[in-house]
């Protein structure tokens, strides 16, 4: 009885090892900002946690994390952080409320640009997006590498929107000036902007002048809750590079060489000098 069972599980193991889709992935987080950032990572409720959940990343530096199979969660970058004393660490943008460098289960306080992932989802595909639904604090680019199926298009928001943020959404911080740009939902709490209450379906929740500000500047980013069609990308068996403050021109040159079937451009050329 044991014999056949053992061979069956061995066969399963062998079969699994042929499908690289079940292999774990890696995320390379790269800081191209001229300032230090503190990436934060929140794993989904049914997902194994990533380690670490937060760390400091100096300008020009990168750190590669190994990501468990079928991981889902979000990644962002905190800015203007200070450790006043042990257990009293906080950031001006995207703070995760832990009081420490590690976020330990805390999410980003809006506004924050978010990279969202569901790995090995439907049909073995990874689903990823860069979301401005919770506002914006810095430019971010997600580039899949080595994917075997799916569009595998890079996505993100390459434009610095803090200075251009509509006045009603702007977050100013003392001597730092404009440090982030709020979503209309967060700024006004209106169900029309939040896609809540009577507006909680894709048909009833329409883009607003505010969400279009984000969408025009960053066409591939999620600009409001039902912006799925042009904002969610897929790729199988990829590793991902997540770049904070990518240089728009360099990025376009590098990415220009790649085949890319995405419907919308990564950068709105009419707003290149915006
Ligand atoms: C952290 O330190 C700052 C500066 O000393 C202080 O204003 C703040 O109240 C402290 N916060 C906590 C939670 O201890
Ligand atoms: C580019 O920006 C212009 C001006 O805001 C806008 O009318 C246009 O729809 C944008 N294009 C894309 C692809 O978002």
Image: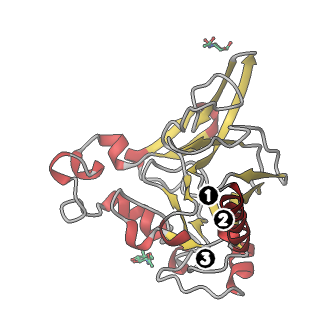
Disc 1, SS: loop
Q: CA distance from mark 2 to mark 1?
A: 49 Å
In percent of width and height, residue 168 lies at 37, 45
- Displayed-image quarter of ligand 1: top right
- In percent of the image, x 64 and y 64: which residue is there? 142
- Does residue 238 appear anywhere in the picture? no
Q: Which residue is mark 3?
A: 152
Which quadrant holds the C terminus?
A: bottom right
Mark found first going from the N terminus, 2 or 1: 2
Q: Residues within 10 Å of mark 2 (few under 14, many from 20)?
A: few
Marks 2/3: CA–CA distance: 34 Å
> Quick one: 170 or 71, which is closer to the camera?
71
The circle on residue 8 is: 2
Where is residue 92 drawn, in percent x and y? 60, 33
Q: How is the image coloured?
A: secondary structure
Position above or below: 45 against 252: above
- For the residue pair 227 and 272, the one nearer the viewer reads as 227
Residue at 49%, 43% (x, y): give it.
111
Q: Residue at x 73, y 69 (%)?
A: 14
Callout 3–callout 1 Cβ contact below 8 Å: no
Badge 3 crowding class, 10 Å Cα cut-off, few under 14, some 14 to 19, many 20 or more, is: many
Q: Give the CA distance from mark 3 to mark 1.
A: 20 Å
Residue 42: quarter of image: top right
Q: Nearer the viewer, mark 2 or mark 3?
A: 2
* Whether residue 86 is situated above or below residue 201 in the rendered picture: above
- Residue 139 badge: 1
């Amino acid at each position: 009885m044991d014999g056949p069972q053992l061979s069956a599980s061995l066969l399963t193991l062998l079969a699994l090892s042929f499908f690289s889709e079940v292999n774990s992935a890696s995320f390379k987080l790269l800081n191209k900002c001229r300032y230090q950032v503190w990436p934060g990572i929140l794993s989904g409720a049914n997902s194994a946690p990533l380690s670490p959940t937060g760390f400091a990343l100096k300008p020009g530096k990168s750190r590669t994390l190994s990501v468990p199979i079928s991981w889902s969660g979000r990644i962002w970058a905190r800015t203007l952080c200070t450790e006043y004393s042990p257990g009293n660490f906080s950031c001006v943008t995207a703070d995760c409320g832990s009081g420490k460098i590690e976020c330990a289960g805390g999410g980003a306080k809006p506004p924050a640009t978010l990279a969202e992932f569901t790995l090995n989802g439907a049909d073995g595909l990874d689903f990823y997006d860069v979301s401005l639904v919770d506002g914006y604090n810095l430019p971010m680019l997600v580039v899949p590498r080595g994917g075997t199926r799916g569009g595998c298009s890079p996505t993100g928001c390459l434009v610095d929107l803090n200075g251009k943020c509509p006045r009603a959404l702007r977050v100013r911080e003392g001597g730092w000036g404009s440090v982030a740009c709020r979503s209309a939902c967060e700024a006004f709490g209106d169900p029309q902007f939040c896609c809540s209450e009577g507006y909680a379906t894709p048909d009833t929740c329409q883009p607003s002048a505010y969400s279009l500000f984000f969408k025009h500047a960053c066409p591939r980013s999620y600009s409001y809750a039902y912006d799925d069609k042009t904002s969610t990308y897929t790729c199988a068996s990829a590793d991902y590079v997540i770049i904070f403050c990518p240089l728009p021109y360099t990025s376009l040159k590098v990415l220009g060489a790649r085949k890319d079937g995405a419907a919308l451009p990564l950068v709105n050329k009419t707003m290149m000098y915006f």
